[in-house]
Amino acid sequence: MRRQRRRRGEQGHDQCVATPVRAGRADRAGRSSRSDAGATLTELLVTIVIMGIIIVPIMNAVIGVIKASSTNRGLSQVETVLNNAADQVNRAPRGCDYTEYAQTAARALGWPRTSATIEQFHYVPAATPVQTGTWNPGACVGATPDDLLVQLVTITVRNPETGAQRTIQVVKSDD
């Protein structure tokens, strides 16, 4: 593209002379020259690498926070079910099987019955007070609870969604 420029002649007369537009400068319409026309492949690659260096750690941090939140939520649910199950077993009338009480706490959150399992033991005192008694399997010696029976109920709750698991022991005895 050429533009016209006024130039003074030898005898003071004005003449119009056409001169070429210089590369690297904007023309009068405000369009940029060829050197500012766009980004090169190298510039684009450098930009992508820099963005990757910044974005990847941020995304890893976000993913870590989400996982930690999910784990804490799962553990919180397990603790809630576990405390509810222990409370229900503790308040239950004296009996020989407390499985239903523990499983009711798990079903309250919509979990399957198998999310809460229990082990039941009864205490058999030693022959003398200076000796240690033993915990035998089963909540009762026979089909019904005896007087002065001491029972140990171990409740284990497992979150079916996250796999988090906790255990608590409840001792039941006559007051």
Image (spheres, rainbow, N blue to C red):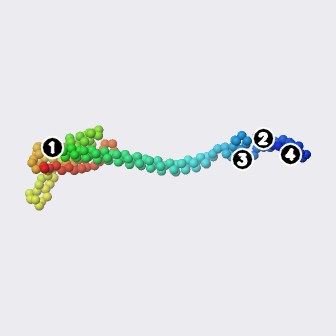
Q: Nearer the viewer, residue 52 or 149?
A: 149
Give, as a three-letter code, the residue at label 3: Gly
Marks 3,1: beta carbons within 8 A: no
Q: What element carries label 2?
A: strand
Q: Give coordinates of residue 138: x percent, y percent.
A: 15, 47
- The residue indicated by pointer 3 is 24
Does the CB distance between marks 3 and 4 fall below 8 Å?
A: no
Mark 1 highlights which residue?
Answer: 93
Residue that extends furthest to the right in the rendered view of this protein: 11
For the residues labelled 3 and 1, the Cα–Cα distance comes to: 93 Å
- Disc 3/disc 4 C-alpha distance (Å): 27 Å
Mark 1 vs mark 4: which is more N-terminal?
4
Numbered mark located on residue 8 in the image: 4
Nearer the viewer's eye, disc 3 or disc 1? 1
Query: For residue 2, which numbered disc appears in the image?
Result: 2
In three-dimensional space, the C-alpha distance between marks 1 and 4, rounded to whole angstroms, equals 117 Å
**Does residue 25 appear left or right of residue 161 in this picture?**
right
Task: Give the mark nearest the N terminus, 2 or 1.
Answer: 2
**Element assignment for label 1:** loop
Few, some or many C-alpha atoms within 10 Å of disc 4 (few <14, some 14-19, many ≥20)? few
Q: What element carries label 3?
A: loop
Which amino acid, mark 2? Arg
Cα distance, mark 2 to mark 4? 19 Å
